Image (spheres, rainbow, N blue to C red):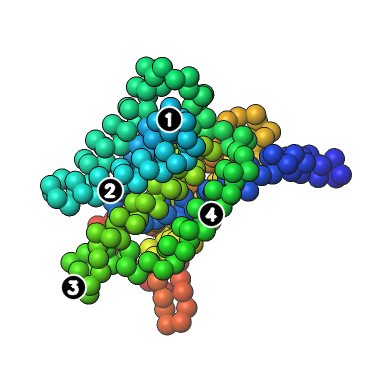
């Protein structure tokens, strides 16, 4: 029994791994929370796109000689502004604007990595993630970003919902849709920047989207979706980190695979739920599995 307990708690004997688990939980919960609004807005591609866009800013900041967080933040915010402006002024759909702007940002990063005269550090961690190498600065930044995201969602929740489900009515009630969308893009950019060094720009989209769509398959209640998506994000991150220790796999990829697995489980649950017919007789609830044919009836 003692041996099995030591085996189970072995990862927590290492300070760097314990910190990585805490970081992954923060990232998983924050991505799960923000992902709900991205999915409901029908902009799932923006998580993938923004993570690629900020890569260009990170490379440029390294060439200039400043902290990569600064360059990535500026580039991410500018990308969000540009996408919002293109969508508003030229009536181009958001997904098209996201595709062009963010892919161009990523291409600039790749171009400069291969042609720049200034020696560049290894950007493999930004592409594929290296959560075990997070520094104290990374941890503080991720913690601050998580707090800012929670505060933003708390204070702007109603206005966000208004802009998602009924933008025309929101305008009537004086909600500045442009400002809300801009703030949301900025928050998304800093979340992506906080997470990309841990999970990687090529994998981050699943960490943002998978918990939200999994929660959406399980329930239709908005507030339950928010809570469930955050919990799923945290569980995926924890299990991914924890299991990567024993199977010696890349942490970011393992977290993403758990995210994909949670989505598959949610699909199975949703399918079984559709098969299960639930109805009431007075105060008694009755449920059973059945398939629908052209004509069927229940006798009790």
Q: Is residue 297 left or right of residue 273?
A: left
Nearer to the camera, 134 or 2 = 134
Could you tell me residue 178's position as x and y percent?
A: 24, 59
* Mark whose residue sits in front, 2 or 3: 2
The residue beneath circle 4 is 144
Where 201 sits versus 264, above or below? above
Q: Reading the chain from its start, which is encountered first: label 4 or label 3? A: 4
| Mark 4–mark 3 CB contact (< 8 Å) | no
Q: Left or right? Give the position of 106 relative to 203.
A: left
- Residue at the spot 49% in from the left edge and 44% down from the top edge: 194
Counting from the top left corner in percent of width and height, residue 103 is at 30, 33
- Compute the Cα span from label 1 to label 2: 23 Å
Indicate the secondary structure of the residue bearing disc 3: helix
Percent coordinates x, y for residue 30 in the rendering:
49, 53
Alpha-carbon distance for marks 1 and 3? 46 Å
Dot 3 corresponds to which residue?
Answer: 172
Instruction: Give the percent coordinates (x, y) of residue 62.
Output: 46, 30
The residue under the point 47% across, 31% down is: 65
């Amino acid at each position: 029994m003692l041996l099995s307990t030591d085996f189970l708690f072995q990862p927590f004997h290492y300070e760097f791994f314990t910190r990585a688990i805490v970081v992954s939980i923060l990232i998983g919960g924050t991505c799960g929370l923000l992902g709900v609004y991205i999915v409901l807005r029908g902009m799932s591609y923006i998580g993938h796109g923004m993570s690629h866009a900020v890569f260009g800013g990170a490379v440029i900041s390294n060439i200039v000689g400043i902290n990569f967080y600064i360059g990535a933040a500026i580039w991410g915010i500018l990308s969000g502004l540009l996408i919002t402006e293109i969508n508003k002024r030229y009536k181009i759909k958001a997904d098209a604007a996201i595709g062009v702007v963010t892919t161009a940002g990523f291409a600039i990063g790749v171009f400069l990595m291969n042609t720049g005269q200034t020696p560049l550090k290894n950007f493999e961690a930004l592409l594929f993630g290296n959560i075990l190498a997070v520094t104290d600065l990374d941890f503080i930044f991720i913690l601050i970003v998580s707090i800012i995201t929670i505060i933003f969602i708390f204070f702007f929740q109603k206005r966000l919902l208004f802009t998602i489900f009924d933008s025309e009515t929101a305008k009537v009630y004086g909600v500045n849709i442009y400002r809300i969308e801009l703030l949301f893009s900025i928050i998304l950019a800093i979340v992506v920047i906080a997470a990309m060094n841990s999970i990687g720009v090529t994998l981050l989209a699943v960490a943002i989207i998978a918990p939200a769509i999994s929660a959406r398959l399980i329930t239709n209640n908005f507030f339950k979706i928010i809570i469930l998506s955050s919990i799923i994000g945290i569980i995926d991150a924890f299990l991914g980190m924890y299991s990567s220790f024993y199977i010696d796999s890349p942490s970011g990829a393992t977290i993403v695979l758990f995210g994909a697995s949670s989505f598959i489980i949610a699909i199975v649950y949703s399918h079984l739920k559709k098969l299960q017919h639930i109805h009431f007789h007075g105060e008694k609830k009755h449920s059973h599995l059945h398939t629908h044919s052209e004509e069927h009836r229940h006798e009790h």
